[in-house]
Image (cartoon, coloured by chain):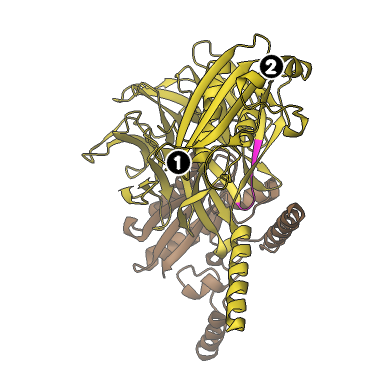
Chain colours: A brown, B yellow
Amino acid sequence: MNTTWRLLLALVFAVAISACKTTPPETDEPVTDSTDTTSSVKEEATTSAAPNPRDYTDERNFDNSQSLLSKRVIYFDFDKSQVKAEYRAIVAAHASYVSAHGSARVTLEGHADERGTREYNLGLGERRGNAISGLLSAAGARGSQLDTVSYGEERPVCRVSDEDCWWQNRRVEIIYTAR
Amino acid sequence: MMIEIMQKLMYALVLLLFSQLTQAKLEIEIVQGNASALPIAIIPMQWHGSGPPPLTDVAEVVSSDLYRSGLFAPLDEEDMVDRPVDAESIRFGTWRLLKVDYVVIGRVNDAPDGNGFDVVYELFDVHTQERLLSQITSVGLGDLRFGSHRVADAIYEKLTGVPGAFSTRIAYVSATGLGKDQNYQLFVADADGFNPQPVVGSPEPLLSPNWSHDGQRLAYVSFEKGNSAIYVQNVATGARELVSSGKGINGAPAFSPDDRYLAMTLSYSGNPEIYIKDLSTGQKRQITDHWAIDTEPAWSPDGKHVYFTSDRGGRPQIYRVAASGGKATRITREGTYNARVTISPDGSRIAIAQGRGNEYRIAILELETGRMRTLTPGVLDESPSFAPNGSMILYATREDSRGVLAAVSADGNVRQRLILTEGDVREPAWSPVIR
């Protein structure tokens, strides 16, 4: 029986590790939805113009890897909520979209890595979400368009205890609930 | 007809196997022992009742309880050359030769009303031949294991001067599955990990269980509505009440010592502050007011103060404020990360999760002297919770990327792992003494 348990445990670990490995490391890449691609291909055929990647009011750029609108995850330093310079342009792109589309609604999901205590990390995740929310508001988004939810360290995208993994978990996900 | 019966049997067998596989059980292993543990022999107890003997081996449960405490070294049953059943037949010289200091003998009877058991037992000092304890512990039909823990409590108290905490329970959260199949369950088990019972399950995160001081209810945080919300649930009946689900964080619930109030962290005002809610009137008052993260409230045993984590000084540290609010005093001074405080039952010490670089350990601080001591080796230790007798601290740690529970004695000398057979286990909370 003991051996069976050990085997089972080993199996569970094997599955867990392989599942972790298959997590795409580039979490800021957009998830390409096959139906979306075909519809945009059709649109291109009729309008015969590819979206300008710098037009941040164009909804098609959400799925255009050339456009900053396709980037919807912002990463942070440990125990910090300051938005680093390299991410400011991404946030500004989303601010343009949200302020141009009154019907757009965004949830800012704040996350932390596993270090530190769970409840403190809930606070930290919220602080990160609020930092992005503040930048969007300052650039013209209305408060009613924005919502912040903190998951703290409860929803990691990667589960290995090292910095290669931790940096991916210290993040705010910009989630459009309406475009 | 025969085939039908066979099919039913097979079905039952599969169900049985499945339930064996899915039953989450904690196993306990001492990873750091104590050289000065007291040698004791718990002689197997004879069954004197009618009918077949009960499944619970009282002496075995008592032995493993005492062993787990780290303060006792029970003699293995196979090394017992003699199994006396009454005081007259104890040959003290033999036990002295075996280097045993204490002997416990006893028997299990039917309760006089037929609805349970009486454990009749005696504790002897081998050297003085003195009888230190002679007691009858009466329990209901399904409670012989619990009764055995009470026997261990009494022996522990007689020999150490501190009440035992074996007949208590622990709550913890177990997460299984990954990604979309992730599932969270809040469990309550006996303090030795036996008999785990699910209290609530959810596909969304569950955290921060906290016991009421009457041992009847658990407050916890659930994300089942898409955001954090605080619930209070009766463990026996399952009835639960939504206590807080405002905008922002609803977290870190903590029952006041009289169970009238629930301290909690709410961020609807824009950042996390500590509030105290009167559970009967629903009225709440804010007791911290700072732009920092103020969270993880814990009551002093007299109910006059609330300790909490705040990064108002730049990094997370422990502060204390009067339960009525007012100016907060900083308590921890050493180290760059001190959080999630738990207070010893006598109020003299606090245990915290202490971070240094990437390593988090459980540390204990004597409030009077300000002396701080690291108790655990790390690397990601958190969520300390004092046993109701102050002897041990239960905490969460990681092992091979998996969350497991561990316990350490308050002096740091004894440490043990509690291994759950499945899931990523975290957020332990030790119950008060259940009367």
Q: Mark 2 highlights which residue? A: B101
Lower position in the chain sequence, tag 1 or tag 2: 2
In percent of width and height, residue A169 lies at 59, 51
In-front residue for pair B56/B340: B56
Residue at 71% over, 26% down: B33
* Residue density around tag 1, few if under 14, some if 14–19, many if 20 or more, within 10 Å: some
Q: Split into 4 quadrants, where in the image is the C terminus of chain B?
A: top left
Q: Please tell me whether mark 1 or mark 2 is closer to you in this view.
A: 1
Q: Is residue A138 above or below residue B49?
A: below
Q: Do labels 1 and 2 share a chain?
A: yes
Residue B116 is labelled as 1
Chain identifier of the residue bearing label 2 in the image: B
Of B348 and A115, nearer the camera is B348
A107 sits to left or right of B376: left
Q: In which chain is the residue bearing label 1?
A: B
Q: Which residue lies furthest to the top in this view?
A: B128
Q: What's under tag 2, amino acid-wise?
A: Asp
Q: Give the range drawn in magenta.
A: B417-423
Q: In this view, does B249 lie above or below B73?
A: below
* The stretch drawn in magenta includes residue B421: yes
Outermost residue on the bottom side: it is: A46
Q: Place residue B346 in its image quadrant.
A: top left
